[in-house]
Image: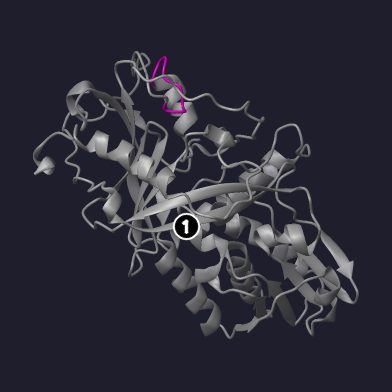
Amino acid sequence: MSRFPHRRSVLGAGLAGIGLAGAAGCASFSAPAGAPRAGTARPQLALLRARPERLFDLTVCLRPFRAAGPRLDAEQVGTALVVHNYGHGGSGWSLSWGSAEIAVRQAMASSPRRVAVIGCGALGLTSAITAQRAGAQVTIYARDVLPQTRSARATGMFTPHSRIALTTAVAAGFPELWERMARASFKAYRSYLGLPGSPVEFVDDYDVFDTTPSAAPAAPEPPALPFADYRSRILDLMPPAEPLPPEASPFAGARVSRGANLMFNIADYGHTLFTDFLLAGGQIRRREFHAPAELGELEEKVVIDCPGYGARALWNDESIVPVRGQIGWLVPQPEVNYGLYYHRVSMVPRRDGIVVQSLAGGDMQGYGDDREVVDRAESERAVAVLASLMTRLTGPSRA
């Protein structure tokens, strides 16, 4: 599975014969005629200390995938208008601000003075802040605050395309709606760049491909579903990735494409959101809901419903499919300021820990799997893949 917005389009054109999946063996590399070449200076990358004993935590998240895309409709529950905002697959953080705009516009249609928000994850917090900016007094009702939610276990990259829907199930206007959400969210994230603590920042990311086939056969994959991919609609948001010339490859014997993407340092970014919400007069009430009728009993008569994967139980919504994702957390290294994708392993250099994730199953990785137990062996294998790449890191950064 690709992490970054431009990956398929760039690599499909710039890395001839090399698939997006990052399979073990890749036989050739060829830039298209007239393609811009990066400077010949070799990037000086800090050495990632990829050792299993440096794994200080393992976490599992269940992404709430809906084949038709996020649920953004409204319904009457008792005396309350409930506006739904859930089912974003792996794109919750990335689409949160744009999705919140849509939900809040519906919620504020009757100009309510008070609004309730269900859930304190990515969608709940951004919906609450957006409703405050629209003039409402907002109370969040949630069993868990952000550090305990599934949103806190996300990878933390701008991936608005990540398993957002199936092309065979979306409505005719969904691509335009997705683009609207992606652009609005990207614009909102710009306002968090440069703040103390770097809640949001740009990082370089490197796709690394071997030049010779691996002796190990690739693991078989289940047939992939037709996941929607609309990244071509937002290629103007960031500069495209470029293949580095051989003399500029930071890894011996490998071909590399370098791009850039937004990274969310969720610990600090979440704290920033939480603080903004409270400073604007927001309130948090701990409560767990077991049936939709309970939402109609709230004091607030307009409710924005952001329960994430919890919507499957709360609304008996079997359209939500769990997509399991596990993260191995390596001890932070401030000097490691680049991301990697190599042999279907992703590395994201967050300030609160270096995120390592296996993507061995491609887009079907974790699909339909609702197990929230950790598998240490999975993360140790991913760390070993990165360790093998670090032995090929060139230049004085190896010291």
Range shown magenta = 15-22
Question: Quarter-wise, where is residue 10 in the image?
Answer: top left
Work out which residue is located at the far right of the displayed protein and give it.
78
**Image position of 249 (left or right of 151):** left
**What is the quadrant of the C terminus in the image?**
top left
Estimate the x, y position of residue 87 in percent, counting from the top left.
Answer: 69, 53
Which residue is pictured at 71% across the width and 33% down the height? Answer: 167
**Image position of 352 (left or right of 148):** left
The vertical placement of 171 against 121, above or below, is above
The amino acid type of the residue labelled 1 equals Thr
Which residue is pictured at 42% across the width and 67% down the height? Answer: 267
Main SS of the magenta part reads loop
Estimate the x, y position of residue 203 in percent, counting from the top left.
Answer: 33, 48
Question: Quarter-wise, where is residue 283 in the image?
Answer: bottom right
| Residue to which mark 1 is pinned | 59
Answer yes or no: is residue 303 visible: yes
The vertical placement of 339 against 246, above or below, is below
Number of other residues with Cα within 10 Å of mark 1, as a class: few under 14, some 14 to 19, many 20 or more: some
**Image position of 111 (left or right of 95):** right
The vertical placement of 250 against 129, above or below, is above
Element under disc 1: strand
Front position in the image: 112 or 248: 248
Estimate the x, y position of residue 200 in percent, counting from the top left.
Answer: 40, 59
| Magenta residue check for 280 | no
Q: How many marks?
A: 1
Front position in the image: 254 or 302: 254
**Image position of 53 (left or right of 266):** left
Q: How is the image coloured?
A: one colour
